[in-house]
Image (spheres, grey):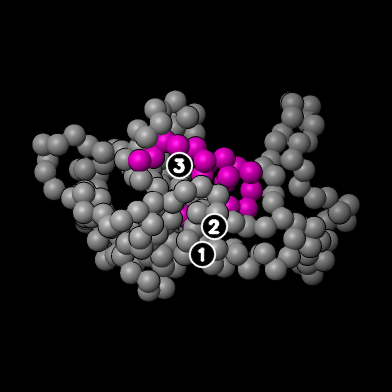
Amino acid sequence: MSESKPKGKLALYWAASCGGCEIALLGIDAKILDVAANFDIVMWPCATDGKVKDVEKMADGEIDVCLFNGGIRTSEQEYMARLLRRKSKVLVAFGSCASEGCIPGLGNMDDKASCFKTVYHDSPSLDNPSGTEPQTVTEMPEGKLHLPVYYDTLKTLNQTVPVDYFLPGCPPEADRIWDAIVAILESKLPEPGSVIGSNTTV
């Protein structure tokens, strides 16, 4: 890993998941300094204050690699998947939720109406006497408030956009994450569509 070559650009994103994949990257311990030495991190919602508008302004393909974790259940997550696919040379389905749906994918046993009925009407711990449900647009004195559209089903990342590589795990193991980072840095990635790392679950 040469210090003299220009830094690459790395993005991480968190869609429908628990967030464990975001934290798992820190499991590489001091090697995170090697990541920082080789990449400018342009988006990592868990750790940095990157703005969507800054990513939108980037040239297509300007991000060298994006580690995208989580499935796609809302319009915002779909927008970010499409945006980061366009802006990234390499898009990695990072973790089992992005790769296979995992726990959020169990939500596909019910549609939106059933999910909302359970969460906003039937839950024993609920205090919602007026039966309020989230709306995509709400008029307020200050202006309109917008929420993403919640879809009937969750899709995996590659059901939404083309994915270059899959790094499964719930979350991916630190050693497998480091193996993937080294492969990226040394341009030793396998054929597109491959699993990098291993198929272990944790």
Q: Secondary structure at mark 3?
A: helix
- Counting every numbered tag in the picture gives 3
Q: Quadrant of residue 183?
A: bottom left
Q: What is the quadrant of the C terminus in the image?
A: bottom left
Find disc 2 in the rendering and name its residue.
Answer: 156
What is the crowding at mark 2: few (fewer than 14 residues within 10 Å), some, or many (at least 20)? many
**Residue 70 counted in the magenta span:** yes
The answer to whether any part of residue 173 appears in the image is: yes
Magenta segment, principal secondary structure?
helix
Are the residues at dot 2 and dot 1 in contact (C-beta closer than 8 Å)? yes
Q: Quadrant of residue 135?
A: top right
* Residue in view at x 55 percent, y 49 percent: 160
- In the rendered image, the residue lying farthest to the front is 191
Residue 110, how many percent across, how many down?
A: 73, 65
Residue 6, how many percent across, how many down?
A: 18, 34
The residue type indicated by label 1 comes to Glu
* Residue in view at x 60 percent, y 42 percent: 76
- In the rendered image, the residue lying farthest to the right is 130
The residue type indicated by label 3 comes to Arg
Comparing 68 with 156, the one in front is 156
Residue 36, how many percent across, how many down?
A: 24, 44
* Residue in view at x 39 percent, y 40 percent: 88
Q: Which residues are magenta?
A: 69-89
- Mark nearer the N terminus (2 vs 3): 3
Q: Label 3 to label 1, Cα distance in Å?
A: 18 Å
Q: Label 2 to label 1, Cα distance in Å?
A: 6 Å
What is the crowding at mark 1: few (fewer than 14 residues within 10 Å), some, or many (at least 20)? many
Find disc 3 in the rendering and name its residue.
Answer: 85
**Residue 60 counted in the magenta span:** no
Find disc 1 in the rendering and name its residue.
Answer: 100
The residue type indicated by label 2 comes to Thr
Q: Quadrant of residue 197?
A: bottom left
